[in-house]
Amino acid sequence: MSERLVLFDLDNTLLAGDSDFEWAQFLIEQGVLDREAYEARNQAFYDQYRAGTLDIHEFLNFQLKPLSRHPRPLLDEWHRQFMSARMLPLIRPSARALVAKHRNDVRVIITATNSFVTGPIAREFGIEHLIATEPETQAGEFTGNVTGTPCFKEGKVSRLEAWLDRRGETLASFAASWFYSDSFNDLPLLQRVTHPVVVDPDERLRAHAHAHAWPIISLNDAHAIRP
């Protein structure tokens, strides 16, 4: 039991922004989604997520349906443009340094955002393992539905446990476990690891961290984390 497991939330943790929100805004700017119909809803869902009141199934219907309206090669091309224009600017040197600090550990990005959006981002960080909400596909094309349990709140715990089970492991298989997150929505998983670390947290998570003497770090400072 010498391996260590390190879990990273993605949005507003490793990223200086939210990939879900940015993907929808990108599609709006490309004219793929109607601005009047989608922009206010996109902002409302983001505000609900920050407030801890998001209905994940309602949001996934909003987020995944556009994937079903376009062929996969076109979606992949849009995503390449999205990575360059919207995601790379949100990857701070301090976040890359934090990931590099754990280079000898088993590293996993675990995120509520769907795997189509987040897979290339995980690869950009050099993180092999991704646990994300999974869009349903048929014959390689997206249906607009979700497969399995959304990777959100308690769902992050169950999705992690299922992933570990497929590897013949549990959290107890590791000498130590970390989870880095900014959001109170991630409290169920933060409470399960041996080393919860909050990153530029929302107000409720900051208060919880102070009450339980959890470390709080910032990735807004380029010198906060060194490899």
Image: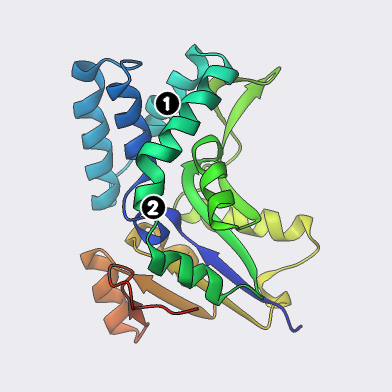
Q: Earlier in the sequence, mark 1 or mark 2?
A: 2
Q: Is residue 219 above or below residue 20?
A: below
| Residue closest to the far right | 168
Quarter-wise, where is residue 163 in the image? bottom right
Q: Residue at coordinates 37% horizontally, 57% vertically from top-left?
A: 185
Label 2 element class: helix
Residue type at mark 1 is Asn
- Depth check: give the residue in front, 147 or 127: 127
Q: Residue at x 50, y 13 (%)?
A: 70
In the visual, does 53 lie left or right of 186?
left
Q: Say left or right for 26 vs 158.
A: left
Task: Name the disc covering residue 61, or none.
Answer: 1
Horizontal and vertical percent position of residue 141:
62, 18
Up the image or down, 131 lies above or below 182; here it is: above
> Does any portion of residue 56 appear in the rendered image?
no
Q: For residue 11, which numbered disc appears in the image?
A: 2
Instruction: Tell me which amino acid carries mark 2.
Output: Asp
